[in-house]
Amino acid sequence: MELAALLNKEHDEKRQGEAFLTANNANHNSKKFYIESYGCAMNFSDSEVVAAILQSDGFQATAVFEEADLLLINTCSIREKAEMTIRKRLTEFRKAKRSNPGMLIGILGCMAERLKSQLLEEEKLVDLVIGPDAYRTLPLLIKEATGGQKGVNVLLSREETYGDISPIRLNSNGITAFVSITRGCNNMCSFCVVPFTRGRERSRDSISILKEINQLVDDGYKEITLLGQNVDSYYWLNETTGVPVTFALLLEQAALVSPLLRVRFSTSHPKDITDDVLHTIAKYENICKCIHLPVQSGNTRVLQLMNRTYTREWYLAKIDRIRMLIPECSITSDMIAGFCTETEEEHLDTLSLMNYSNFDMSYMYYYSERPGTLAARRFTDDIPLETKKRRLQEIVDKQGELSTKSNQNDIGKIFKVLIENNSKRDQHDWTGRTSQNKITVFPKSNTAEKPGDYVWIKIYDCTRATLLGKIVDQA
């Protein structure tokens, strides 16, 4: 799955689960729910859909899980470590349930679909198991579980997009928001469990997408991220007009909603990002100049084993095309170290591809075999763990060099930055991101700038992960 590597710090399974509190939970007599989300941005977006469904059923959110009537974890199965983290958290929840026997514990998302029998029967950790396409049935399943039965629905759908549900923006800063445009995945990458846990790909209708974006703008949001396992394959036919909506057209329509709205997207599969998309990005100033383009390996033989459907040379040609059409575009990626049968020379191919591509940032992991995937059925996980970890460290070190060099190249330049929040390290500083999705920290000025404002920042220094600058007059 590509989306597990979205954009920035928010979106990998290392992130701790968050409790979300809606703004309108003043009714202290209502039932309360608590939800934690792990993994990719789609899970966080799904949790906002779940919150809307629960609120319509009379639930209100709480930030204190001990006082909840319903505890939910929206899960990730992309790597074994993510599942281990969630199992540990479930054990902690079970302790809370001992003092509140009426409390229900539920698993949502990919892990729910993959491990339903183990969670319900073998380990008896949960009362509810709901797959990604079954959230509409939550109220009924809760009633069943309240009556003593296990509430289970992990059926996958070929139609469900939740397009008619207005998500409740959880723990929102009021500035940035996710907008889901596709669900599922048709790419059968051999290492990936997503096609089996999220089902076949389907596109949400563009009418509901644009309605949601317009509402976000009316509510004061300044940035959206269009989400999908593979956004570039978005396709919806408007049966009223007979006009097909491709991702390039949808991206343009989103940009035209407001010139003050920044538009991001993730994730792209290299085989599907077209020149039409690249030209659209180049055409509109408010479409962010950042493309996440997961490569996974720099060696053609390994890519074939991964069923990535492109070669090393083809990928590098795509990098060249992006650089030519959008010179200021940042490119980020994913890498997997130690895939089945990978040799030392093939590992070095990944390092050399990184050098050529000059990735601004990457998400990097060593291979973790997932039961049920094509790789688990076809190949032997034959690379020793010590070798995987060593190769991963070399990839991490290489990306560190590239990220530092990329940031150093920005010193002296002026960027338009959207202020998002106070700096976590110093309340006298703001933090925001450039169009290229680089975190930027800068001192507050004596003017009245605030989160949600755009400011021009001149970069004077950097770290490996952050640009450091000062507010200047418009470039």
Image: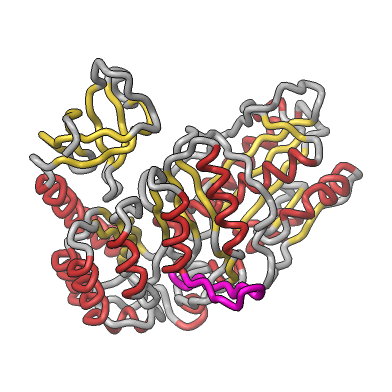
Point 33% across, 65% down: residue? 293
Point 22% across, 70% down: residue? 319
At which x and y percent is residue 272?
A: 40, 75
Point 39% across, 53% down: residue? 264
- Horizontal side of 333 relative to 98 (left or right) equals left
At which x and y percent is residue 455?
A: 27, 33
Frontmost residue, 469 versus 129: 469
Taking the image as drawn, is residue 347 in sight?
no
At which x and y percent is residue 381?
A: 41, 73
Taking the image as drawn, is residue 391 in sight?
yes
> What colour scheme governs how the chains and residues are painted in the rendered image of this protein?
secondary structure
The quarter of the picture where the C terminus appears is top left
- Horizontal side of 466 relative to 223 (left or right) equals left
Relative to 181, does residue 178 appear above or below in the rendering?
A: above
Relative to 417, does residue 379 appear above or below in the rendering?
A: below
The residue range painted magenta reads 232-246
Q: How many discs mark residues in the rendered view?
A: 0
Relative to 49, does residue 457 appear above or below in the rendering?
A: above
